[in-house]
Image (cartoon, rainbow, N blue to C red):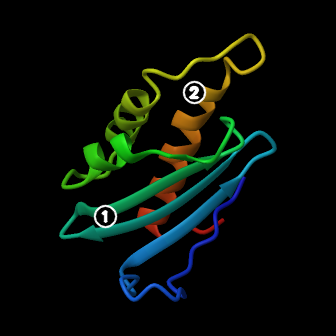
Amino acid sequence: MGTESSAACDDPRVTAETKIGVCNLCEAICGLVLTIEDGLVEDVRIAWGGVAHKPWRAERAEALLRGQELTEEAVVAAVEDELADAQTDDETAFKPAMLRRTTAWTLLALAEGRTR
C-alpha cells in the first residue's frame, strides 16, 4: 500500500503546503487533499471509490477534521461518524474498518511527508 503526494495541480488553491494523496487497494481507492496550517487541519478533502454504488465524498468527516489537530484518533472518529449510516452485507462488512485504517494511514502519511 502506498501513497502518492504532489502539489502539482491546476487548482489555484493548491499551494506548496497542500498535500494530495491517493491510496489504491484492491477493494477501494482513497483520494485525499490535505492542508495543515499551524499544526491544525485547514482543509481536507476525502473521497472513496469502490465502496458504494458511486464515489463517496466524505463531507461529514471533512467537516469534523477541519480546525483539529490531525491524529489517528481524530481521523478514525471522523470516518466512523461518516460511516454511521452506511449499510453493509456479508460481502461488504469489512469495508468500514478498511476505510478507517486506510484513511487514517494515508492522511497521517501525507501530513508527515511520507509518500511510500
How many marks on residues? 2
In this rendering, position of residue 90 left or right of residue 70: right
Which quarter of the image is occupied by the C terminus?
bottom right
Residue at the image position 62 percent from the left and 47 percent from the top: 55
Residue at the image position 64 percent from the left and 17 percent from the top: 88
Residue 60 position, x and y percent, is: 34, 41
In this rendering, position of residue 39 left or right of residue 61: left
Residue 12 position, x and y percent, is: 39, 89
Q: Nearer the viewer, residue 115 or 91?
A: 91
Q: Which image quarter: residue 14?
A: bottom left
Tell me: residue 96, above or below residue 68.
above
Tell me: residue 7, above or below residue 104.
below
In the picture of the structure, the residue carrying the numbered disc 1 is: 43
In the picture of the structure, the residue carrying the numbered disc 2 is: 96
Q: Nearer the viewer, residue 28 or 89?
A: 89
Residue 42 position, x and y percent, is: 25, 65
